[in-house]
Amino acid sequence: MAALLEASGIVRRFGALVANDHVDLVVAPAEIHALLGENGAGKSTLVKILYGLLQPLEGTLSWEGRPVTIASPAEARRLGIGMVFQHFSLFDALTVAENVALSLPASTPMATIEAEVAQLSRAYGLPLEPRREVWRLSVGERQRIEIVRALLQNPKLLILDEPTSVLTPQEADQLFVTLEALKAEGRSILYISHKLDEVRRLCDRATVLRLGKVVATADPRAETAASLARLMVGTEVKEARATAHATGAERLVVQGLSLPATDIHGTALKDVALTVRAGEIVGIAGIAGNGQDEFFAALSGEVTGDPGTISLDGRPIGSLGINARRRLGAAFVPEERLGHAAAPGFTLADNALLSGHATNGFVRRGLIDRSAVTAWFRRVVSAFDVRTSGPNPEARALSGGNLQKFVVGREILREPQLFVVAQPTWGVDAAAAATIRQALLDLAARGAAVLVISQDLDELFALADRLAVISEGRLSEARPTPSLDRETVGLMMGGIHGVAA
């Protein structure tokens, strides 16, 4: 059978960087095809070329056996290619149907759009209420909008970028059922994911990129997660392993923390209580938008309140700002690495200065010690294997995984007594994730209290000694991780309270 889509000899450069180096890819009809690789391997560049967002400098594309030039996303959609990006492009204040309407001709009646959304969502098991505002929806429901919006174009090929990174286990299972139904209809899926077990479960074939080149085409079901990771990285990826150690006294204590939502789309915190001991990793699971951002802001000092609601080593810190908390031995890594954890247009050295100026001795008598800053940032780059395109590049020049290793590394190397991190390995490849997870385990083994806020249950079950769930601004009791299972935690994440009891 002829290929549905064939890319041959695709080359794309950005300055001296060769993002795609004579890449070949063949997607067959009615196939779920995985595209695998480390961060920076060239996956995003390739799919942007397939969707018309970038043009190749060399190489050809064929669609259903005939050569094509995909000059724009509109041309891709006309051919029958749809794409659901990892980061959603939705307007919170608009309804489901209004968001879908933005990708359709302006003359399409809203009543028609609402009917088609309702019909498609029922047909593919993606329940949606067309007139519901997006800000009221869970992340899983928002993803359904993106998929339904793409399906309204009646695509023959659907490209999905990290589709399960923000889903509960139950939502991920439902997505897999939907994708199998699309395949049964004769549609093809190009599936990008760092979750290798789900690739093995779902995909018929996999193309593996490394450093911009295709290094393998494999049958995922005949591979193990470890062997797929080895193909992606080129070496064995060691699993993170905890070192046996004792826990100490309560280091972080949160008691009766209630904060109003800062805007209509925010989530109020409601009587949150939590303790984290020295030498312990506590995980907080939850679907995005249930109060994680607000809780992180309260812990980091970006939002302050009653001094007695949060204490560190017995000292009330609820009214202290972020620099004062850093001076007391706390460190923080927010979820959004580019824009929150790092200033995109600043060099790595200047980003190291931004977070370390209050604690690392970089500023003396109002003057910046540039040699100290440079030595520090180079130490972070070396210790955490941060791969850069130059001696001191801007933060936005790094791949997601390398920037994440940098922002985590600059905080861990300070040897904090309390470390709070949100989504430590979100969108990060297997090797970088193993590096970061091992660093968290080692930090706890040295006596730090570590709090990990994550939507990745595999990560939390691998790291956390105790686990709590945040839902609608309320935090469950933290329970020993071995006493919980994925299904129970997934139901709690979905808003079914009291399940753990």
Image (spheres, rainbow, N blue to C red):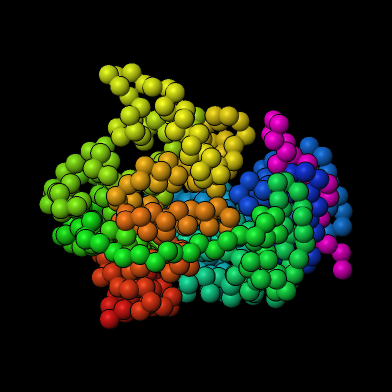
- Quadrant of the image containing the C terminus: bottom left
- Quadrant of the rendered image containing residue 6: bottom right
- Quadrant of the rendered image containing residue 196: bottom right
Q: Answer yes or no: is residue 244 visible.
A: yes
State whether residue 213 is above or below residue 441: above
State whether residue 303 is above or below residue 144: above
What residue is at 73 percent from the left and 38 percent from the top?
A: 18
Residue 331 lies left or right of residue 181; in this view the side is left
| Residue closer to the observer: 315 or 395 | 315
Q: Is residue 270 magenta?
A: no
What residue is at 52 percent from the left and 53 percent from the top?
A: 435
Region rendered in magenta = 1-19
Q: Is residue 18 magenta?
A: yes
What residue is at 41 percent from the left and 73 percent from the top?
A: 490
Residue 342 lies left or right of residue 262; in this view the side is right
**Residue 302 % position (x, y):** 27, 42
Residue 124 lies left or right of residue 471; in this view the side is right
Q: Main secondary structure of the magenta part?
A: strand
**Residue 419 % position (x, y):** 33, 51
| Residue closer to the observer: 424 or 106 | 424
**Residue 300 % position (x, y):** 28, 46
